[in-house]
Structures are given as structure tokens and as C-alpha cells.
Amino acid sequence: MAKNIVVIGTGYVGLVAAVGLADFGNRVIGVDIDKRKIETLKLGKSPIYEPGIEEYLNRNLKSGRLAFSTDIDQAVQWADVIFIAVGTPSREDGSADLSYLWSAAGTIADNVNSYKVIVVKSTVPVGTNRKLQEFFDKKVGKGKVSVISNPEFLREGKAVYDFFHPDRVVVGYADKKARDIMVDIYEALYLNETPFIFSNWETAELIKYASNAFLATKITFINQMANLAEEVGADIHKIAKAMGMDGRISPKFLHPGPGYGGSCFPKDTKALVHMGKEVGVDMSLVREVIRANEMQKLRMVEKAERLLGSLQGKVVAVWGLAFKAETDDMRESPAIVIINELIKRGAKVKATDPKAIENAKRVFGDKIAYFYDEFDAAKGSDMVIIVTEWNQYRNTDLEKLKKVMKGNVVLDARNVLDPEKVKKHGFVYEGVGRK
Ligand code: NAD
């Protein structure tokens, strides 16, 4: 049966959840403390770039099942089920900052007027859902609120698709009634034979961290193999392909590059190390992954310096600023470390990205020059570094590139170009893990 659902936080996760839950037939209100975001959403415009999101947004706004508001109190009173999708960024010490989550919990507690299910979609450290349940039991009385842990696994750039086609749905619960309400909400997925994992809160919370830490480890592993391949004259693509043919390994997440970034892997790996510390378990493997990933970003700059002799006074065009293709998200993007280091070593940076320029301006200000067109960025440059794997860079016009550049060096940190083809056009080419 359709439910009245409020989604608190309309960022990458909350917005996708709001439109997706409305599309399932529920009545949904997305709320946020960011007034500008809510005004934009009311107009049917997405504050983030995510393929397909505006189509779903407008379809559900028109149907009347979806609305947006800044009146969180009223929305909570109206709701049967409240999804929390606020940010949980890293603190200085690596632990997760839960201040947004607790602020949302406080608002909910002040407005409980009937039985509510609180669904925590934000990524939170083990023990948080139990603490939330204790908080509500104390504030509003036992049996008035049931907390559910329902971690999100969507990939930015494919978020809408992932919402409707998840590999699995994880539901951590203590109250059977709330568990059944979750099955009701996700009925379309449940009937579609999407696997559901039911567990206690702690297991659900750790599934999320374990998954992200494993993926970060897999990327870091192939990056280190790529570095070794480079030094010994091997080809990482053939290595990854052959490794991936082993069903136990799988070919996914074996693409070498400039290091992982984004809003999740960096903060979740740090939070996992911190969680281990708190209970006396040494998460040494994950700790090393974090360190190696930082080194990988710097390795790209060292390559650039070696290829150009020195970076002092050189003009470097950076193609791609977002942490990966098909998103405008710059959070923890490898481009940030790479560009800052290029500048530190004396280079002048001309940057381009199909979607992330506005966000990049907030990161770099006037330290770099911005171009909407990649050939404008490359004009007069000594080197082009490809940092994000946007499709438009894969089949770039090499003839045109050669004409506009001053130098002839291409550093392909995502291995999106065919080395032979690039070299044939007279470029000095270097990728990651292959020459
Ligand atoms: P985000 O920063 O894009 O969005 C968070 C939103 O919450 C913001 O719009 C903010 O204004 C709003 N907010 C903060 N406090 C609020 C409050 N008290 N009341 C109402 N709104 C409030 O974050 P995100 O990327 O969507 O991530 C949200 C959570 O989901 C994080 O815990 C993250 O780890 C997790 N997650 C993210 C992804 C991803 O790919 N982005 C994937 C899986 C899980």
C-alpha cells in the first residue's frame, strides 16, 4: 500500500530516493535545509547532474505524488515513513561527522505525532542506528518510532538506474512491523526478485562499509599492479583482462587510474579505520589502501614532471575535473590533488570538464583557468592530462589537438586513448600501467 514518505536531505542520495519512491506510487515530500535547492527542485530542475533525474523528477511532480518543502516539521507530522539521507562527511580524525544526522533526528523527535518508521539511508558507523533507537525511545516513548538501517549503494552517474535495479537491498531492523513496512515500500523490487538481506542494525551498517572498503582496495590493488607493470614493461590491460576471466576475481573495478575519489570511498575507508581503532581491531589493510591511494594521485604529477623535464612555467591542460564520468561531483576528486600539486610545482593549469566547472570554481577559485571546450583548454599547452574518463575524450580529434597544442605530450591517467594511434599523430604518450 502506498505510504506517505518524507526524505530528509535532497542531495545525490536523497533526491534519487525521493523520485524513485514516488515513482513506486508512494506520496513523497523531499525536504532540505538548503532553501535554494528546494526552490530549484520545485521548478523541476535538478541541482545536480545525474543522467535521467530530471525526467523522473518532472514526471512525479506532475503526477502530484512528489513535492518539495523546507517545512520539515510539518512534513514529519504528515509522514508514515521518514528516510534520512543527510551527509555524513569526515571529521579531522577520520571519523564520520554525524551532526547533520542528529540534527535531523532532533527535528523528527520534536514532531512525532503517530507511529513512524525512520529509515537511515546515510552511511553511518556501526552502532548509530541502535543509538538512534535509544534516543527516540527516550525522547518520544517506546513503540512510537522504529529505526531501520537501509544503506544506499547507488553509483553517481548511474544513480537513477541503480535505484530501480539494485544488486541487493539491505534492511537492518529490530522491529518486525517496520521490516514489513520496508518490504511494502520496496514491493516493486521485492516482486522483481531483487535480493533482500535482512539483518540486525550492526550487520547492515557494516555491509555498507565492507563493500566500499573492498571496492577501494580492488582499485588500489590494480593501481599498484599498474605501477609495477609500467616499470617492468608489462601491459596492465592484458593483466586485468586475464585476471578478470577468473570468476573468483571478476573483471569489474580493475581499471587503473589516478586513484579513487568521490564522496564515499575516501570518507568511508577513513571511518572504517576509525571504527576499528575504537574497538581495538587494526584495520591495517584499509589503512594502507588510503595511503597508497594518496600516493597514486601524486604519481600522476611525478609522471607529468618527468615527461616535461620540469613543470616550472609549463602550461598543462587538465581534461576532466569530476571524480568520475557522468557526474558533476568534485568531492575528493583526484583532480583536486593533481591540480594543486601541478600549481605547487610551477605549472599553469587550464582546466575543462563537461559538467563540473561550476563546482570546480568553488574548489579552485581563480587559481586556474576554466574552459567549456577541451580544445580551448589545450590551446597553447605543453601537455594534456586526462583525469576523468568522459566519453568525449575517448574519440578525440587528435589532428586538431596536435594543431592547437604548443607541446606534444599526452598523459592519459585513465587509459581512454589508444596509445599507438596517439603516438602515430606525433604525440609523446603515457598511460597508467602501459607505455
Ligand atoms: P549530499 O551532501 O549531496 O546531500 C545531503 C543533503 O542533506 C544536503 O542537500 C543538505 O543540505 C541536506 N541536509 C543536511 N542536514 C539536513 C537537515 N538537518 N535537514 C534537512 N536536510 C539536511 O550528500 P549525498 O552524497 O547525497 O550523501 C548522503 C549520504 O548518503 C551520506 O551518508 C553518504 O555517505 C551516503 N551515500 C552517498 C552516495 C553517493 O554516491 N553520493 C552513495 C551511497 C551512500
Image (cartoon, rainbow, N blue to C red):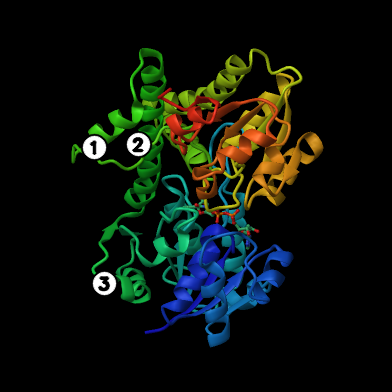
Please tell me which of labels 2 and 1 falls first in the chain.
1
Type of amino acid at the residue the image marks with label 1: Ile
Residue that carries the numbered disc 3 in the rendered image: 192
Camera-nearest residue between 167 and 32:
167
Looking at the rendered image, the disc whose residue lies closer to the viewer, 3 or 1, is 1
To which quarter of the image does residue 385 belong?
A: top right
Question: What secondary structure is marked by label 2?
Answer: loop
Question: Which residue is at a point 35% across and 44% down the rendered structure image?
Answer: 211
Q: Type of residue at label 2? A: Leu
Q: Please give the residue where the numbered disc 2 appears in the rendered image.
A: 254
Marks 2/1: CA distance? Answer: 9 Å
User: Which quadrant of the picture is home to ligand 1?
Assistant: bottom right
Residue denoted by label 1: 249
Inspect the image, locate mark 3, and give the three-letter code of the amino acid beneath it: Asn
Find out whether the residues at labels 2 and 1 contact each other: C-beta distance under 8 Å: yes
| Mark sitting earlier along the chain (2/3) | 3
Q: Is residue 292 above or below residue 251?
A: above
